[in-house]
Image (spheres, rainbow, N blue to C red):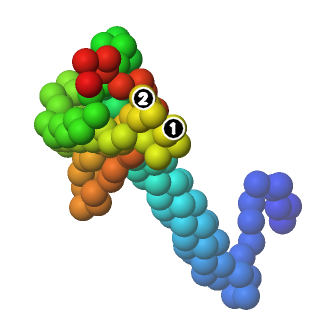
Amino acid sequence: MFLNNRTRVFSRDRRGSLLIEVLVSVVILSTALTLIIQSMTAGLRAIQYGAGYTTAIILLDNQICDLLRQGTVRSGLRETKSLAWPAGSRTGYSYSMRAEPSDIVADNKIVEVDASVAWRSGKKDNQITVTTFLSVASNE
C-alpha cells in the first residue's frame, strides 16, 4: 500500500499535540492583544493629559495678552474668575492673577505679575503658574 504525501499517520505519541499547539498560540495571541490594548489606552490617557495642559496654557496666554494690550498694569491687582469651558471639554478652568511691586527695581515702576490657571482632570487637580514683569500704570 502506497501512502500519499497528504496522508498523515499519527502515532500514539503525537496524539493531542495539535490541541496543545493551538492552546499555546491562543495564549500568545491574547497576551499580544492585551499589550496592544494597554498601550493604546496609555496613549489616549497621555493625549487627554496633554490636551488639558495645552488648553490651560492657551487660556493663560490669552489673559497675559489682555494685560499686554492694556500696556500697563496697576499694582495691587488681584483677580480671580472662572473661564469659559472650551467646546467639548468636561473640565472647568479657573484663572487667578495678582500684581505686586517688584523688589528688583528700587523706584517700583515694575510690577511682578503672577498668573495661574487651575483645572480638574479626572481625580487630579492641575495648575500652571506664570510669573512675568510689567510696567506700572502711570496714574499711580
Determine which residue is flagged by label 2.
109
> In the rendered view, would you say 140 is above or below 80?
above
Left or right relative to 50: residue 122: left
Q: Amino acid at mark 1?
A: Val
The x and y percentages for residue 110 are 44, 31
Quarter of the image for residue 78 reads top left
* Frontmost residue, 27 versus 18: 27
Q: Which mark is residue 116?
A: none
Q: Are marks 1 and 2 in contact (CB under 8 Å)?
A: yes
Q: Amino acid at mark 2?
A: Lys
Please rate how many residues cluster around mark 1, counting C-alpha atoms within 10 Å: few if below 14, some from 14 to 19, many from 20: few
Quarter of the image for residue 116 reads top left
In the rendered image, the quadrant that contains the N terminus is bottom right
SS at badge 1: loop
* Frontmost residue, 87 versus 43: 87
Left or right relative to 12: residue 29: left
Q: Residue at 34% of width from left, 31% of height from top?
A: 60
Evaluate whether residue 104 shows in this view: yes
Quarter of the image for residue 2 reads bottom right
Residue farthest along the front direction in this orientation: 107
Determine which residue is flagged by label 1.
105
Please rate how many residues cluster around mark 2, counting C-alpha atoms within 10 Å: few if below 14, some from 14 to 19, many from 20: some
The x and y percentages for residue 107 are 45, 34
The x and y percentages for residue 49 are 40, 46
Residue farthest along the bottom direction in this orientation: 13
In the rendered image, the quadrant that contains the C terminus is top left
